[in-house]
Amino acid sequence: MNNTVIPNFIGIFVSIFLALLLFTKKGKNRSDNILGIWLLTIGFHLWLYYMMLSDGIYQFPILLGSHLIFPFLHGPLLVFYIISLTKPHQFTKKMVTLHAILPIVVCLIYFPFFSMTADEKIRVFQNQGQGFEHIISVVNILLSLSGLFYLFYNFKLVNDHKRNIMAQFSNQEKINLNWLRILVYMMAFIWILIIIVQSDFLIFSTTTVYLICIGYFGIKQVGIFSNTSTNIIANIPIQDPNSTIIPEQIKKYAKSGLNEETALEIHEKLNQVMIDEKLFKESELTLDELSKALDVQPNYISQVINEREGVNFYDYVNKLRVEEFKKISVLPENQNFTLISLAYECGFNSKSAFNRIFKKMTDLSPSEYTKSQLPTK
């Protein structure tokens, strides 16, 4: 067994193992099924590649050429998985049909080859695709375009989700998809190998590593491969991505029905509630909960925060938490408490999130800030 074959066997085993975990898991949902199907697709693709290397594919002439279709399936399947997680209401038959068009077109392009007899197919393969050079060139161009499109589209889906949760949640550690962002980055690397390097060994070896990463992040992320499922990500209300405004690009809300006077009243009411009741200390505070406390529509609160504070809901609440920490951390009666215990008191729910957010908003670590507040001798 040569070094080229070993990664394939590992990848095939990992893909089947992870797919079985998903299909046998209790309480599995649509995203689990899609991920399982995608893993089996990757596994079968790796098996076809092994059969090509070993010339075993000639024993199954009906499969000759099928490996040319599989690269067009991975982009759509990743899109289906991300959408099923982040925007389940957009997962429709129309959407699936739309993304199935290109694979179907490629099948039609290769139809003259697929309609050949077994001996004719083998002859074409043994002669490096002789007679189909133009078709192969066209399909390679389509493959490159498909890869680029799905890279950008998948990045957009993950970024839209991040903006959405930052517009509605004050803590995102349990619902972020950073692990999925890493998988999209790795998929981008594989597509670079496909388009530029064109080394089958590197492509399929990297794919094996990719499968191992899916397993690692999947097991680490609660509810993907385990029986403890969570629907919190899928149940996040979807907002227009433009509703999350960054300070340097504040946009007006079109047709919101919120006039200047009402916006001012909501802003005053918001600040009063936050100062008096310190709602930001609730670690899992959401836009919906704040909406109920103020008796104001969530989209109005989001608009007021975006336009008058210049930040999204996530940054607004965490800015208040940081300011509260800065106040209580210098009090004499709190000097015996650890910084993280004070951070929890202010509404943060993890040390990593606290350190990251504090550094982002002050350019100092919490310990550097507290040291800077000590009286000089």
Image: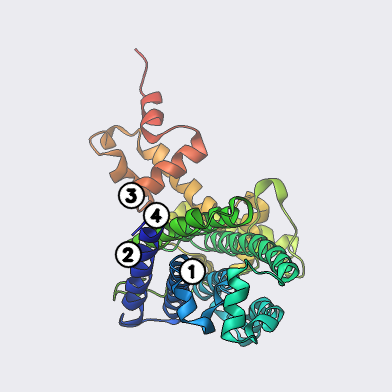
Judged left or right of residue 2, residue 192 is right
Q: Residue at x 39, y 28 (%)?
A: 368
Marking on residue 281: 4
Q: Disc 1 designates what residue? A: 52
Contact (Cβ within 8 Å) of mark 2 with mark 3: no
For the residue carrying disc 2, how many other residues have a C-alpha within 10 Å: few (<14), some (14-19), or many (20+)? some
N-terminal label among 2 and 3: 2
Indicate which label's residue lies in the foreground, 1 or 3: 1
Task: Tell whether label 4 touches label 3 (CB within 8 Å).
Answer: yes
Asked if the residue under mark 1 is in contact with the one under mark 4, i.e. CB atoms within 8 Å, the reply is no
Q: Neighbour class for label 3 at 10 Å: few (<14), some, many (≥20)?
A: some
How far apart are the two marked residues, 2 and 3, measured between alpha carbons?
31 Å
Q: CA distance from mark 4 to mark 2?
A: 31 Å
Q: Secondary structure at mark 4?
A: helix
Is residue 321 depicted above or below 332 in this figure? below
Tell me the distance, in whole angstroms, between the alpha carbons under discs 3 and 4.
Answer: 7 Å
Of marks 1 and 2, the one in the foreground:
1
Write down the residue under mark 3: 345
Q: Residues within 10 Å of mark 4 (few under 14, many from 20)?
A: many
Quarter of the rendering containing residue 27: bottom left
Compare marks 3 and 4 and give the one earlier in the sequence. Answer: 4
Q: Amino acid at mark 4?
A: Lys
Tell me the residue that label 2 is attached to. 219
